[in-house]
Image (cartoon, rainbow, N blue to C red):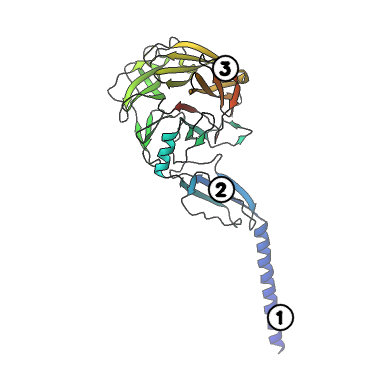
Amino acid sequence: MKKRLGLLIGVLAGLLLLLGYVFYALSIQRGQDTTIRIHQVDQNGRPIISPGPITLVGKAGHRNPFHPEIEGYVLANRNPLSANFPRHNQTIELKYRSALTLTQIRQTLAKAKYLQVGTQNTATPVFNEAQYQGKKETVARISVSGDGRSWTKLPISYPRAQLDNPSLLYQKRRLTLFDGTNRYWTTNFKDWHVQRLALSSPLFKNGRIQTVLPGVASRQYLVVRARDRQTQRSQLYYQVTQNTTNRNQSWHQLRLNGVPTNQVIGINQIGQRVYVLRRYRQHIRIYRAKQINGSFKSIATVKLSHTQRATVTTASLLPVAKHRYQLNFSSISHQDVQTITNYQQLDKRFRTVGSHHQLITDYLWVQFQTSQQGNG
């Protein structure tokens, strides 16, 4: 009897020790920090939000504050995260597709009065409408607008490549991006084709795309920045191209009449007239030609008072009313901090009207080009 009692006491003591260890282990687990890294990407693996990935740190078992919803997108795979932090560190990838149908995306592009293409830096956060650009991971972005002041990002899957300074054309339900030496195009806004362009000629070498302006009958004017073979200086050249090829077409030099090409920060087409925007000290000087093959002449200098301690990096000109224009521009400080894009209203003689204002955008534009629908 005494042996049985002793055995029972020993078993009970063992159970108590085991329960104590379990509670101790659980208390440690609930008190430890768990790290979750969440990559939110489109169907081509390109980041949707900035900065990315999202990093969450919390105690195991505590509430997980993450919400997977992204405006304009629908989650395409299962979210493995629970309502509470897990016991172990995790890195997950959530893929999203557009919440718009193919027809809705086409209608959005066709009905937009203005189009924008540019890049977003997903490597650094945005604080007080400013972002450090010393570290970059740029993703292509497209936005649409009805008034030129408020812009909405197009929720599609973007090319699986890092684009630096893209240009855009949307013709006959075909969306085309040009960047560097490549042309990217899609008709379903998810699957992108890529083609390397032949950007050299007896006139120049090392060509890179500056912009693309629309022509007629599915033709475009492809404008490149390249090095002149004779003078070794950087110049701007253009070529008439088709959607499918740019071969066997002659190149021509833009007649800029001495404008340094390294100071050209934007080219726009309004009707048949072509405008070149030049960074000139702390201002923007506007040049105009009746057609792309014409001679460019200086027509105005827009003074930008708020950029005294910054450098204007990109500019674009839009027609917003009869005899009224809008100059969009971005600037960066000497510390590589870029602020949100601004705009300045101009009258028919390109004189400033009022003060500058900030554009309303879904993200901070790094590089950008804006155009009126049907114009470059």
Look at 50% across and 49% down and name the residue there.
94
Residue type highlighted by circle 2: Arg
Q: Are marks 2 and 1 in contact (CB under 8 Å)?
A: no
Please tell me in which quadrant of the rendered image residue 359 appears: top right
Kindly report which numbered mark, 2 or 1, lies closer to the viewer in this rendering: 2
The residue that disc 1 covers is 9
The mark that comes first in sequence, 3 or 1, is 1
Percent across and percent down for residue 234 are 43, 16
Choose between 89 and 285: the one closer to the eye: 285
- Image quadrant in which the C terminus is located: top left
Element under disc 1: helix
In the image, which disc is placed on residue 352? 3
Question: How far apart, in angstroms, are the residues tagged by discs 3 and 2?
Answer: 47 Å
Residue 137 visible, this orientation: no
x then y, percent, for residue 116: 47, 30
State the image quarter where residue 254 is shown: top left
Q: Amino acid at mark 1?
A: Ile
Residue 79 horizontal side relative to residue 175, left or right: right
The residue that mark 2 highlights is 37
| Mark found first going from the N terminus, 3 or 2 | 2
Q: Quick check: can you spot residue 321?
A: yes
Nearer to us of marks 3 and 1 is 3
Which residue type does callout 3 highlight?
Thr
In the rendering, at what x and y percent does residue 270 appear? 43, 21
